[in-house]
Image: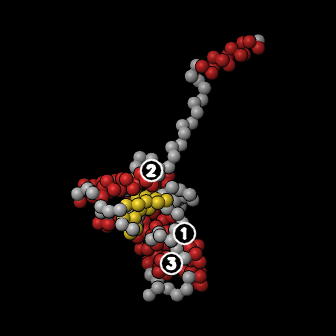
Amino acid sequence: MVRLVALVALVACHDGSEIAPAPATPPPPDPASLASYLDTIAAFPPAAKAAELAHWKLERAAWNRIVVEPFRGAYDAYDRHFADAIARAATRLHAGAIATRRHFAGDPHNTPSESWLRWAVPTLYPSAVATIDGTELDLVFVHDGAGWRALAGLGDIIVERGEVLDPGCTAYLDAVAQKPCAEVGFLIATAAIRSDRDAFDRACRLAASRCGKRSP
């Protein structure tokens, strides 16, 4: 009986019925690959560049997989803003010294929008940002497994929705890189993206005590 059990087990291990190991998760792409890619398309003629940048839009499935709540709920607005945002990006993307880096919260080199969009992706998510001739491209890039995409226009949506609630309060978002304002900036941005007036008003009152006087 023992031999029979052993024989059955041996056959089961070699008849293809065993569970295959899960495929290894590919490592996140290095920002150097983004730099090389941007360097290539920066030299494209305008029409070819615009056509390539149009592919930077995240499809809804990838957006839902990468972008976190409450920003995830803004996909329709992202879709509407994308064309205008990417057209502006096309004018900034030109041949020059292109450098890329991982996108971290608190990076003093981030633009305000790059700082806000750190909250739109998971903690430690390998998003990336780029500079051309030392100037920020002001875009956050994510890799969806097939190629680099951009959260182009999402910062505009935060400001647009915030200004509907209180135009003056959105000025606090520009100070988000300052440590005392970072946490409250998150509260303002998330309330704005949800169009949650009560939460927005509370965040603005808190910002008044932490961030000082609003910008004119």
Secondary structure of the residue carrying tag 3 is helix
Q: Amino acid at mark 3?
A: Ala
**Numbered mark located on residue 166 in the image:** none
* Looking at the image, residue 65 lies above or below residue 167: above
Tell me: residue 194, above or below residue 8.
below
Q: CA distance from mark 1 to mark 3?
A: 11 Å
Q: Nearer the viewer, mark 1 or mark 3?
A: 1
Q: Residue at x 48, y 65 (%)?
A: 117
Which residue is disc 1 drawn over? 106
Question: The residue tagged with tag 2: helix, strand or loop?
Answer: loop
Other residues around mark 1 within 10 Å, as few (<14) / some (14–19) / many (≥20): some
Residue bearing the label numbered 2:
144
What is the spatial separation of the Cα atoms under label 1 and label 2, in whole angstroms? Answer: 24 Å
Q: Amino acid at mark 2?
A: Asp
Residue 54 place in picture, x, y as percent: 32, 56
CA gap, disc 3 and disc 2? 30 Å
Q: Quadrant of residue 3?
A: top right
Disc 1 is placed on an element classified as loop
Residue denoted by label 3: 175
On screen, residue 6 versus residue 191, left or right, reads: right
In the rendered view, tell whether residue 72 sits above or below residue 13: below
Q: Amino acid at mark 1?
A: Gly
Foreground tag (3 vs 2):
3
Residue at 60% x, 26% y is 18
Mark closer to the observer (1, 2): 1
Residue 133 seen in the current view = yes
Q: Earlier in the sequence, mark 1 or mark 2?
A: 1
Q: Residue at x 56, y 73 (%)?
A: 182
